[in-house]
Amino acid sequence: MFRGLLFSSLFLLLTFSSVGAQKAPYVEENVDGHRCLVVEPAELPAQAPLIIVIHGLGGNATDLVRFFQDLHLPPCRAVFPDGLFHAPGSTAKDKAYAWYFPLFEKNRKGIEASRDHLFKLIEHYSRDPQGKPTRPVILMGFSQGGVMSLEVGLNCNHPILGIVDMSGYMPDPSKTMERVKAPKTTPILIVHGTQDPIISIQLAQQVQGVLTKAGYHPELKQFNMGHQMSLESMATVHDFLISILEKKTP
């Protein structure tokens, strides 16, 4: 199943990408034995945001680089991590990863291990050359990456500028929301397909309801699509990110 998820998302990513556009190179780094790709301009402003971009089940760090570059955002440091676990049915050679599994069960052990790893990445990449944490953070991801964006963004001690959940859900809302740290004013965007056969639109609506009940003000944007990203949904993500980057209120 994970290969189907990966291929459907990549098809839309390639469609969204502009042909022949110049792309900034990425740097490959290793944190605690796991690969991260880092994309940033040669001269990065001291307080430019850190954006953690999280792939879905069966994907890897390279999947969302091209999509992200096509958003043409203001200067920022973007980090694309590999998931902690090999996806079910894959091998190390496949470079197909997961953040947790099984997909729809309350697997807190895997989710919390991945959450803690992403916390470490935020701590590592948000610091300036002198080692001080200066960069506010945006979490965004697709499918399992959307799940982890919510889990990490809502429970992080670091200043969070915004959270983008694309085609995700919340496996165990009571645990995710148990001790949330993000201010209730944190901008949260939920993007989901009404025809999603993998993660139903009802699960996205559930996330919206849980967050609203907790005092947050999430935006749920529904599109006539499946478990994927479209030009229209990506334009919505772009506009959301631009709006919060322009404010830059850590």
Image (spheres, rainbow, N blue to C red):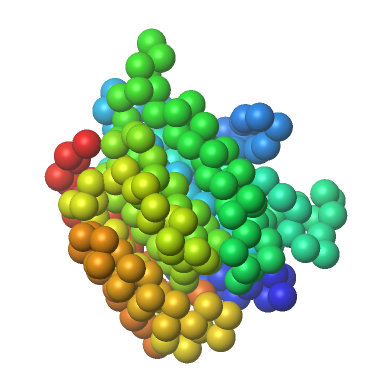
| Image: 52 above or below 207 | above
Question: Would you say 127 lies left or right of 88 here?
Answer: left
Question: Residue 59 lies in what quarter of the image?
Answer: bottom right
Answer whether residue 80 is visible to the viewer in this image: no
Residue 183 visible in image: yes
Q: Give the vertical position of 174 relative to 178 (above or below).
A: below
Tell me which residue sits at (77%, 63%) in the image: 88
Q: Quadrant of the N terminus?
A: bottom right
Residue under the point 26% across and 61% down: 214
Split into 4 quadrants, where in the image is the C terminus?
A: top left
Residue 86 vs residue 53, the one in the foreground: 86
Q: In the image, residue 247 lies at what x, y percent? A: 15, 45
> Between 216 and 118, which is closer to the camera in this rendering?
216
Q: Residue at x 30, y 24 (%)?
A: 134
Image location (x, y in percent) of residue 145: 52, 58
Would you place residue 210 above or below residue 240 in this image?
A: below
